[in-house]
Image (cartoon, helix red, strand yellow):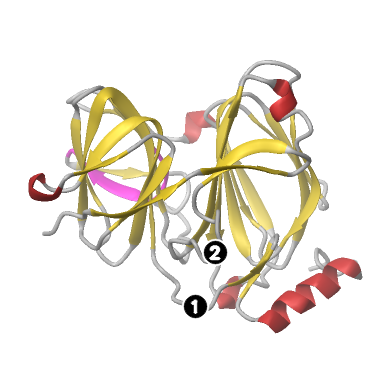
Amino acid sequence: MSTRTLLHVIESMPTSDGAGVKLRRSLGSQRGLHVDPFLMLDEFYSDNPNDYIAGFPAHPHRGFETVTYMLDGHMRHEDHMGNRGDLGPGDVQWMTAAHGIIHSEMPQQTEGRLRGFQLWLNLPSSEKMKPAQYRDIPSREIPAVALTQGGEIRLIAGRLDFDGRALNGPVNGAGAKISTEPLFVDVHLPAGTEFTLPIEASHNAFLYTYEGSVEVGPAEDVKRLMHRAAGVLSAGDRVRMRAGEEGARFLLLAAKPLREPVVQYGPFVMNTREEIEQALADYRDGRLAAA
């Protein structure tokens, strides 16, 4: 058994997207700044409605999956297929854009805090043109487990052998599998609490701290990951984490790497430039979401 270490840090950068929603972007903040198969991670967090009220009007996607995880506030998703979903605190939407989807994501509040994340997860070339689909996952369907040493984990995706029992997330758990085999865990640790979690040795993994800081790695190679930064992990079959003096809340993400070319143009992620040009033509001609 080997414990993963903190290889390098990707600081989150302030930016805006949609119709001017203010957010912070770590993965994807620069071209090629990915952790295969993860393409992008955005954190949105504001108590000022001017930072989020304009939302994300109708826009296209092709070639990957988007995962929206809400912590506070309410967001509504609507797409070209007539689907509508309302996301509240603790809810998740797992959308497979694949061949193409045109959707909007609009805040359903005019005041108060809006806080959450959007993750982009790549699809293998063999799945980029399959029909689009999505799933809304209410908070009550996401397993939450209290840790004996204090704190809690929420398992959004994947499977964990935890305290002598199998824990399955609502995505990629006991049911249908996703080809990238994602693990998505939201971890809350009180100050000074240590926690070790198993991770599939062949998977790439990173952490993102959204409150406090966390020390990562074995006792002989501990490094601190500060607030609002993504920490890319080395190879290994487990990760050891210890919350800083103010406690820590962070996301742990791992998945099977695709090791395929990534060609991205805005909301389109394919394997070749020709496929990107086809996506642009399909969007222009009304064929993007016709599958």
Helix, strand or loop at label 2? It is strand
Q: Position of residue 273 (x, y in %)?
A: 68, 80
Span of residues in magenta: 154-163
- Residue 122 is tagged as 2
Q: Does the rendering let one see residue 69?
A: no
- Residue sitting at 73 percent across and 21 percent down? 109
Q: Quadrant of residue 156?
A: top left
- Tell me: 60 left or right of 4: right
Q: Three-letter amino acid code at disc 2?
A: Asn
**Residue 54 at what x, y percent from top left?**
79, 33
Q: Magenta segment: does it hold 155?
A: yes
**Residue occupying the point 60% across, 52% down:** 66
Is residue 152 visible in this depiction of the protein? Answer: yes
Question: Residue 47, position in %: x, y?
Answer: 62, 19
- The x and y percentages for residue 97 are 67, 59
Give me the disc on residue 260: 1
Secondary structure mainly formed by the magenta segment: strand
